[in-house]
Amino acid sequence: MPHFLAYPKRWQDYAATIVGGVLVNLVWASATVAVMTVMGIEVTPVAGEDIFGSWRQLALMWPPVGLEELLFRAPLAIPVAFGLERGLAPLVVALSMLFGWAHGGGIPHIIVQGGVGLVLSLIFLKCGGLYHRPIRGWLCSTASHGLYDSAIWLAVFFGGP
């Protein structure tokens, strides 16, 4: 097993994993969107909706994040439960691609959000999914996902589109 998936031993290790995931996702999403923009490919997070209009919308974004994490990360606990860890990598890739597709349906979203989903899957696995503690893994991936979405929300709210 790769060292970066070693089970956290202290609460600081969980916090570092969550914050590290947020930072990696922000860098990944910013870089890929910038490259696509230079290439003339438009990547809009939610076409035709203004989700950045009020603080209430920031709070309302968290419950769907938990549901998304349940939908796209919980299946990763199934191969672990049955000792089939070899099938985990293809499942991580497939669920990450579905996560990207669910956020926009096109190749740009599969690339940008699929990369984000890949990081969230690794957080889920590291924080508990690989160690028969899927709820702990889900809590960590949900926290990282919610903080990532909140960071984007704050950047757009204060910085403009």
Image: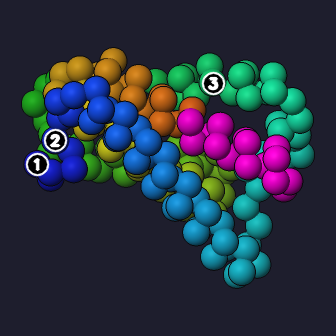
Image quadrant containing the C terminus: bottom right
Q: Work out how far the residue at label 1 is from the one at label 2, CA to CA, in angstroms.
A: 8 Å
Task: Report if residue 17 lies within the magenta region.
Answer: no
Q: Which type of secondary structure does the marked residue at label 3 adopt? A: helix
First along the sequence among labels 3 and 1: 1
Please, what is the three-letter code of the amino acid marked with disc 2?
Ala
Residue identified by numbered label 2? 6
Identify the residue at horizontal 39%, vertical 29% (top origin): 140
Horizontally, residue 50 falls left or right of residue 114, namely right
How packed mark 2 is, by other alpha carbons closer than 10 Å (few <14, some 14-19, many 20 or more), is some
- Residue 129 lies, with reference to residue 43, above or below; the image says above
How packed mark 1 is, by other alpha carbons closer than 10 Å (few <14, some 14-19, many 20 or more), is few
Please, what is the three-letter code of the amino acid marked with disc 1?
Met
Horizontally, residue 153 falls left or right of residue 77, namely right
Residue farthest toward the front in the current orientation of the protein:
12
Mark nearer the viewer, 1 or 2: 2
